[in-house]
Amino acid sequence: MSMDIVKGMLTTLKNMGKKPTTISFPEQERELPPRFRGRHVLHRYENELERCVGCYLCAGACPADAIYIEAEENTEENRVSAGERYARVFDVNMLRCIFCGYCQAACPTGAITLEKEYKLASFYPEDLIFHKEQLLEPKGQATTGSNDVWAEQPPADADQPVPQETQVFDGSSASAAAVGLGTLHTEQKVLIVNEEQDEDRRKL
Ligand code: SF4
Ligand code: SF4
């Protein structure tokens, strides 16, 4: 018997009786870490309006070119989101997605998050392009999703990162668009709260 076989058997004997590190998926499933990034979800506000304002920032941030959006204007008769526009088409191609989370980080309204669903196998590639209808939260079930664990909540007295009048912005609970202030008042000073910084910026 060669030494290699003896070494192999010793390793086997050493590990016999130890708790296995594998699990019997799919009967058993591991508990996922709070910041696990799985399938995307599009969120609504509690008033059922969609958070997505069709700004394309997520698509622009996506390194895999996995997001396809077609935006359309809201009208008084058909108000879908709280902003000027909404996403009429919103597709995420899971075959391209690398689950980096850049889309979630780029979204100014907390509209898109990566959640815990990871069982995404399919026999047909076209089934792995998820459309808005599949991604959007049902009415009456609005959540902020994993933004709760990713987003650092600002202190109550924080300066505002976007211009709006309620003094409440955290990217999730409220936004300029969410409070009906998607149209900026250009005569107001925005974004700059420190006069010195303001002067410095003007010099650049
Ligand atoms: S998680 Fe990353 S790769 Fe996937 S859609 Fe978002 S930005 Fe693109
Ligand atoms: S999900 Fe967010 S970043 Fe993407 S288009 Fe909608 S509002 Fe813009």
Image (cartoon, rainbow, N blue to C red):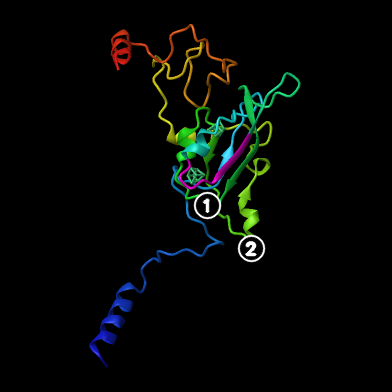
Judging depth in this view, the residue of 109 and 202 nearest the camera is: 202
Q: Residue at x 30, y 10 (%)?
A: 199
**Residue 139, how many percent across, how many down?**
69, 32
**Residue 198, how many percent across, how many down?**
33, 11
> What residue does disc 2 label?
123
Residue type at mark 2 is Phe
Q: What kind of element bears circle 2? A: loop
Q: Which mark is residue 96?
A: 1
Q: Nearer the viewer, mark 1 or mark 2?
A: 1
Q: In this view, which residue lies farthest toward the top?
A: 187
Q: CA distance from mark 1 to mark 2?
A: 16 Å
Residue type at mark 1 is Arg
On whether residue 69 falls in the magenta region, the answer is: yes
Q: Residue at x 44, y 12 (%)?
A: 190
Which image quadrant for residue 52?
top right
Q: Which mark is residue 86?
A: none
Ligand 1 closer than 8 Å to label 1 CB: yes
Of labels 1 and 2, earlier in sequence is 1
Instruction: Evaluate whether residue 51 shows in this view.
Output: yes
Judging depth in this view, the residue of 141 and 80 nearest the camera is: 80
Q: Residue at x 52, y 10 (%)?
A: 185
154 lies above or below 42: above
For the C terminus, which image quadrant? top left
Q: In the rendered view, does 6 fall on the left or right side of 182? A: left
Instruction: Evaluate whether residue 146 shows in this view.
Output: no
Start-end of magenta stretch: 62-70
